[in-house]
Image: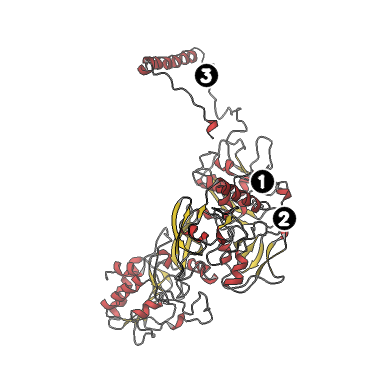
Amino acid sequence: MSRVVDIIIDGENYRAEENSLLIDLLIQEGIKVPYFCYHETLGADGNCRMCMVGIEGQKRPQIACDTLVKEGMVVNTKSDTIREVRKNILELELINHPVDCPTCDQAGECSLQDFYMEYGLHNSKITIAQKVKHDKAIDLGANVMLDQERCVLCARCTRFTAEITKTHELGIVGRGDDAKVTTMPGRTLENDYAMNVVDLCPVGALTSKDFRFAQRVWFLESSEGICHGCAKGCNIFIDHNKLKYKDDTIYRFRPRRNDAVNGFFICDAGRLSYKELQEMRQESATLHGREISQEAAKEAFHNLLLLHQNSIAVVIDANLYTEEIESIINFANTIDAKIYAPLDIYKDASFADEMLKSSMRAANYKTIENLGITTSTPQNATLIINCNHPQEFRADATINFFTHRRETQALTLPIAAYTESSGSLTNEDNITQYSKQAVFKNSPLPTISDYLQGLGYE
Amino acid sequence: MSQNIKVTKRPVNSLKHALYLPAIAAGVKVTFKHFFKNISDINAVETLRYPEEQPTDISDRYRGLHRLTHRQDGSEACVACFMCATACPSNCIFIEAEEREDGLDEKRPKSFFIDTLECVFCGYCVEACPCDAIRMDTGIFSLTGNKREDFVMDKEQLLSHKGAFGEELSRARS
């Protein structure tokens, strides 16, 4: 543990660890500093030169990402010289930029746009015709599109593939105006975390093929959620939007920083899991494959419970929120039913890896274990109440609470998906996290606990 | 900005201003002047017998029905950047974007709808367009239909509207 020292930034006193990076302190304290190439996990590269600050005693401005904090350091980030330096560097970054913001998916969350409004506001000294042309709309593979003209050569993407995934697909070739990001000839970008380069790219050079032209980002609303892809519980932003006369729709998942769980990244499988979530939804109560009214469903539910008294098993999906699981347990105790949560079906060793992906593909299985719920398949029950468990069970009768449509003749009641309700989840490392409701449908579906309340239990 | 601000003197706070009566009298005088003039010569009244008579004073600045402009090859100039939809105060522009394959641009509108019943004809979409792709220079000021859907203009309709003042193609996209 190194010594904590005092330093002065823009006339104010701050305390920081000696020999830590100055830019970390600036970011942490919310002091505005522009940068492209620096990233907390990828470290300093010092190639973009945007994070210039003035340091007393130093002749020239220095880059904050490669400056170590020293005792008594006096830093200035707001002087006219610093503004001028940043403006000139930005002008260099923008020399060959095609300014095709209208067709660029990054527009609205682009560092170049933000810094131009903050520091640039200059007129370009060269015309569009004089700009160096490169290839646009290159499909790199793994749902990533590359536009070499928009690139500022910050090397975040190449450092990601070199340091984080260690797959080394991306590199920068050429010199001067000819320098560009590319893959090795004949090779494509292919790793399970490839789409993180889209978030890492501070400009529109790397964009998502999946999100391509789907929405302009300023229309989207970001809600904080937890990915349900596996037991890791990666923190995500659920970007969704309710278009006029349409229903609330999710357009993308983005990683949300949580150093205790997933850091800055999520896997591609989790990122794209929003699609499945919105397809083939169970939207109304069904019996024998036909739609029935809420009242008829309620009656059928009560009749089945009466008919199969004392021989009922409740099966709980290990993806449900803890609050839901608890209310199901309460309900099961009231009707004297046995509770099961078979976990074998969630195990998928081929999905797991060393980084974020867990072999247990159930977001809340730890709660099932912690609550001591039986994990075997139900035996000797004549009625099974399936609370969205993916497995199919054999019994005389079944009542299903399903988010998604499945082939079944049994009484099936539609329930809200995890993005349409909120609750807590405990991940495989026993970290309990809260997932907020993101999507508010025009006709919202109830959760299982809503149903149980409406049916007179609880 | 500061050099563009023009400071004007406030009118003097005299008894004449405070009373309001002289100003009211001046207003009433104008009203009665027109009243007697129109009563004496009914043909001098500036009224248009619409729809038999059509207006003749529609200029190129008049905000009529929208149109989408073309490029030289006849395709749409729009790149589906959603600036018009973003600027629109009544949210009546509905765009869906898709990949443009001909190499002129990357993006084009797959569908482009303007609900003219919701539109307030403010012209913000024209102001916002970076490609000179949407204009309101058709000179069309009257629109009829039998049902609400008739007033929702789709991309083909908007592209088929002609500019009334000579300028056909987009000035920003060739």
Q: Which amino acid does label 3 sit on?
A: Val
Q: Nearer the viewer, mark 1 or mark 3?
A: 1
Tell me: B120 left or right of A98: left
What residue did someone put label 2 on? A133
Position of residue B37 measured from the top left corner of the image (x, y, whole percent):
49, 13
Tag 2: Cα neighbours inside 10 Å, few (<14), some, or many (≥20)? some
Give how far apart the Cα atoms at labels 2 and 3 are: 64 Å
The reply to whether dot 2 and dot 1 touch (C-beta < 8 Å) is: no
Residue A71 x, y percent position in the rendering = 48, 60
Asked whether the beta carbons under mark 1 and mark 3 sit within 8 Å of each other, the answer is no
State which quadrant residue A137 falls in.
bottom right
Mark carried by residue B45 = 3
Looking at this view, is A448 or B51 the one in front?
A448
Q: Mark 1 lies on which chain?
A: A
Q: Is residue A348 above or below residue B44?
A: below
Of marks 2 and 1, the one in the foreground: 1
Residue A297 horizontal/vertical position (percent): 35, 70
Circle 1 packing at 10 Å, graded few (<14), some (14-19), many (20+), is: few
Residue, disc 1: A124
Above or below — where is A281 with respect to A202? below
Q: Disc 2 marks which amino acid?
A: Lys
Helix, strand or loop under label 2: loop
> Is residue A23 shown to the viewer in this render?
yes
Q: What residue type is labelled 1?
A: Ser
Which numbered disc, 2 or 3, marks the residue closer to the eye? 2
Q: Do the residues labelled 2 and 3 touch (CB within 8 Å)?
A: no
Chain letter of disc 2 in the image: A
Q: How many marks?
A: 3
| Left or right, residue A269 beside residue A389 | right
Q: Do labels 2 and 3 share a chain?
A: no
- Can I make out residue A279 in this image? no
Q: List x then y, in percent, for residue A326.
A: 32, 73
